């Protein structure tokens, strides 16, 4: 019995191992079938890579007032007749899963027989950028030990969106992209350069759909009805009526007009869950008798003020940049060569992009903030919510995807620490990070500052560093410089040359402390040589009184001394 | 036969068809909240140039925040020094001077201006 259930798996494993040895691309992509789960804060998008569209399932457990005894898990909410006063239990806190007692039943239901069974297929699940270790541990445990998936892969939803965009537009690897993912819990702005995330320039705004819904709820509760309990309904109100305006000031002036002349004000018919299941915008000049008995919500400037928070979080007292400003900041934190390409390839995904006018507004703001010569293009997919999920197919087609996949054997042998490193380093290029951080540090070579230090014009004399002998990395080449240092300490009068030498040693050490040690070793030797050479050349100058040097003090030192 | 046993040992078989039914533990497990997780993450010895959760937070904006009336939402040039509410015209002022304390506090909370300094 048990043997039967096991045998297909073993044959599969064997096949995968052979295909790893002999890379045959076509056969691999044809044979791979994987479950892709975009585990969002509000909805889970799940389905197999061959499916056309994913299933969208609410990622929460709900309690209804009408049926007090029952919990509605995920999709079961469709069975609920009266959605007034719906109470949400959300698994995520600011987008990170912290309430596993909520997340687990939702997943249980999702992977159950009738929704989306795993059936021994590889599983790809998304996680937010910089997911915490304890959360990843828990996820590993649940997937490998509880669901017993044969292999697992975790990546960021933005990775998938990038891959999807790159595939659709046949981008070359050198073309940089900026992905803006504005979801339920937060908004991430992540540049992709040469196919990898450039995380130094990544930005996160803690503004998402949840915050907008809650704010709308607050406003309405203060201005009209108390709807603090009606998150579900107000979320629908937000989806149906809110939009992003081009110019807030002008729009506000329009909204301040009296009702008859006002084009913004809309009456929203609230659902009563008897005749009307879902609210809608009331048509002007038409009154249904059905609506007579219903409550009507009048929305005026709330319609555009609420989404405005995405662009100006300072409106509600958040000390944070808006999306456009943060995107520009992110672009400018990237290497110079790639900035132009980033402005050209801006992809917006996530539920907030569905606000009408969002793309136009973002474009207008970016256009005014970026240089005139650059092309600015904002790409809004036809369905921004499932766009990332659709990138799962592109992920499977990556040539090195199989090697990134973690099998259960790997998990049992290596433990979660190692496999998490594999997940977290996906699409992050380490060599690039070193390259980008190195050159600016080496270039800051202020020769005269070293001299000034050694000559102690500005007060205290700095002794040569004692750290150089303690430093373990210095052992090989340190012998020579150490002896020099001792000389310098013993006979301060001896020669300026020695001193300035030791100081420049110190400077070179400083510049290398931040850089990786083993790489620093080699180039350090060369730099020391260089600095020695420098001193030799400049030694004539250093022997003179520096305070009289015209080069340093063209106007004399009288004002300093 | 020997081989079979080896493979059996490699993979313990306890998977049943009803695997998706959650295990029933009577004791309730409590999980760390996000704040705890973040603070423990911050306490880790990070190198200076490392990028992590807290460091990618978008910095404060360079543009000053716009001022809108708390009552109506239209641009407000005035602030009531007593309640700190913003208002656009004298009609609004007439309403807001009569507002009870809890309502004004609510309006301020709505704008996120509850701090004493702001």
Image (tube, coloured by chain):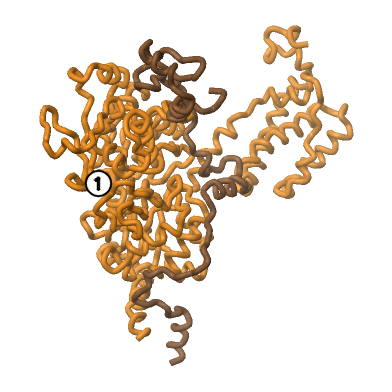
Chain colours: A orange, B brown
Q: Residue at x 31, y 56 (%)?
A: A67
* Residue in the foreground of this view, choosing between B79 and A544: B79
Can residue A310 be seen at all in this image of the molecule? no
Does residue B69 lie above or below A535 as drawn? Answer: above
Q: Residue furthest bottom?
A: B1
Residue A117: x and y in percent read 30, 67
- Left of A90 or right of it: where is A47? left
* A474 with respect to A45 (left or right): right
For the N terminus of chain A, give its image quadrant: bottom left
Location of residue A130 in the rendering, given as x and y in whole percent from the top left corner:
48, 48
Q: Is residue A272 visible?
A: yes
Q: What element carries label 1?
A: helix
Q: Position of residue A55 (x, y in %)?
A: 26, 56
Q: Is residue A93 above or below residue A554?
A: below
Q: Which residue is drawn at 29% across and 63% down?
A: A116
Residue to which mark 1 is pinned:
A168
Q: How many numbered marks have been drawn onto this rendered protein structure?
A: 1
Q: Position of residue A507 (x, y in %)?
A: 69, 33
Q: Decide: is B70 above or below A108.
A: above
Label 1 neighbourhood size at 10 Å, few (<14), some (14-19), many (20+)? few
Q: Nearer the viewer, residue A486 or A131?
A: A131
Left or right position of A200 against A70: right
Chain letter, disc 1 residue: A
Q: Quadrant of residue A147?
A: bottom left
Question: Horizontally, is A328 left or right of A351 in the view?
Answer: right
| Res B8 quadrant in image | bottom left
Residue in the picture at 48% in, 67% down:
A411
């Amino acid at each position: 019995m048990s043997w039967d259930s096991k045998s297909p798996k073993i044959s599969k494993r064997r096949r995968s191992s052979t295909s790893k040895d002999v890379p045959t691309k076509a056969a691999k992509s044809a044979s791979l079938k994987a479950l892709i789960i975009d585990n969002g804060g509000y909805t889970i998008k799940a389905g197999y890579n061959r499916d056309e569209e994913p299933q969208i399932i609410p990622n929460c457990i709900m309690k209804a007032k009408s049926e007090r005894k029952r919990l509605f898990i995920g999709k079961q909410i469709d069975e609920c007749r009266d959605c007034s006063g719906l109470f949400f239990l959300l698994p995520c806190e600011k987008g990170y899963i912290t309430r596993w007692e909520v997340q687990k039943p939702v997943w249980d239901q999702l992977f159950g027989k009738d929704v989306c069974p795993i059936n021994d297929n590889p599983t790809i699940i998304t996680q937010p950028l910089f997911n915490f270790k304890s959360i990843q541990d828990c996820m590993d445990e649940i997937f490998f030990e509880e669901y017993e998936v044969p292999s697992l892969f975790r990546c960021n939803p933005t990775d998938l969106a990038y891959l999807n965009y790159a595939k659709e537009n046949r981008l070359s690897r050198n073309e940089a992209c900026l992905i803006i993912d504005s979801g339920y819990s937060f908004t991430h702005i992540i540049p992709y350069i040469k196919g990898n995330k450039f995380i130094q320039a990544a930005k996160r705004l803690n503004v998402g759909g949840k915050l907008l819904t809650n704010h709308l709820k607050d406003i309405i509760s203060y201005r009209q009805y108390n709807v603090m309990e009606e998150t579900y309904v107000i979320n629908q109100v937000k989806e149906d009526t809110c939009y992003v305006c081009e110019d807030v000031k002008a729009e506000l002036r329009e909204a301040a007009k009296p009702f008859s002349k006002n084009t913004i004000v809309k009456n929203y018919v609230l659902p009563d869950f008897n005749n009307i299941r879902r609210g809608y915008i009331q048509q002007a000049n038409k009154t249904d008798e059905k609506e007579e008995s219903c409550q009507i919500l009048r929305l005026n400037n709330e319609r555009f003020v609420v989404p405005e928070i995405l662009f100006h979080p300072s409106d509600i007292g958040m000390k944070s940049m808006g999306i456009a400003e943060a995107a520009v900041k992110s672009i400018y934190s990237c290497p110079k060569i790639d900035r132009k390409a980033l402005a050209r390839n801006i992809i917006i995904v996530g539920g907030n992009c569905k606000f009408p006018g969002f793309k136009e507004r973002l474009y207008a703001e970016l256009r005014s903030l970026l240089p005139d010569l650059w092309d600015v293009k904002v790409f809004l997919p036809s369905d921004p919510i499932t766009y990332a999920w659709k990138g799962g197919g592109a992920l499977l087609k990556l040539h090195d995807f199989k090697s990134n996949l973690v099998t259960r054997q790997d998990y049992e042998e290596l433990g979660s620490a190692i496999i998490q490193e594999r997940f977290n380093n996906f699409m992050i290029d380490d060599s690039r990070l070193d390259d980008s951080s190195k050159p600016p540090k080496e270039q800051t070579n202020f020769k005269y500052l070293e001299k000034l230090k050694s000559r102690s014009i500005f007060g205290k004399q700095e002794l040569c560093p004692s750290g150089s002998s303690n430093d373990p990395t210095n052992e090989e080449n340190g012998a020579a410089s150490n002896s020099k240092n001792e000389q310098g300490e013993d006979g301060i009068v001896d020669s300026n040359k020695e001193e300035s030498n030791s100081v420049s040693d110190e400077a070179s050490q400083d510049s290398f402390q931040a850089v990786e040690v083993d790489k620093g070793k080699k180039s350090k030797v060369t730099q020391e040589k260089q600095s020695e050479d420098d001193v030799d050349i400049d030694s004539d100058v250093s022997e003179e009184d520096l305070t009289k040097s015209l080069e340093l003090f063209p106007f004399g030192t009288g004002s300093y001394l | 036969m020997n081989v079979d046993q080896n493979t059996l040992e490699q993979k313990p078989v306890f998977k049943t068809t009803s695997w998706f039914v959650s295990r029933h533990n009577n004791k309730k497990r409590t999980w760390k909240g996000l704040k705890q997780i973040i603070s423990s993450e911050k306490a880790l010895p990070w190198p200076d140039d490392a990028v992590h959760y807290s460091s990618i937070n978008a910095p404060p904006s360079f543009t000053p925040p716009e001022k809108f009336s708390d009552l109506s939402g239209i641009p407000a040039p005035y602030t009531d020094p007593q309640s700190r509410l913003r208002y656009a015209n004298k009609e609004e002022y007439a309403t807001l001077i009569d507002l009870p304390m809890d309502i004004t506090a609510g309006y301020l909370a709505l704008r996120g201006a509850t701090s004493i300094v702001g």
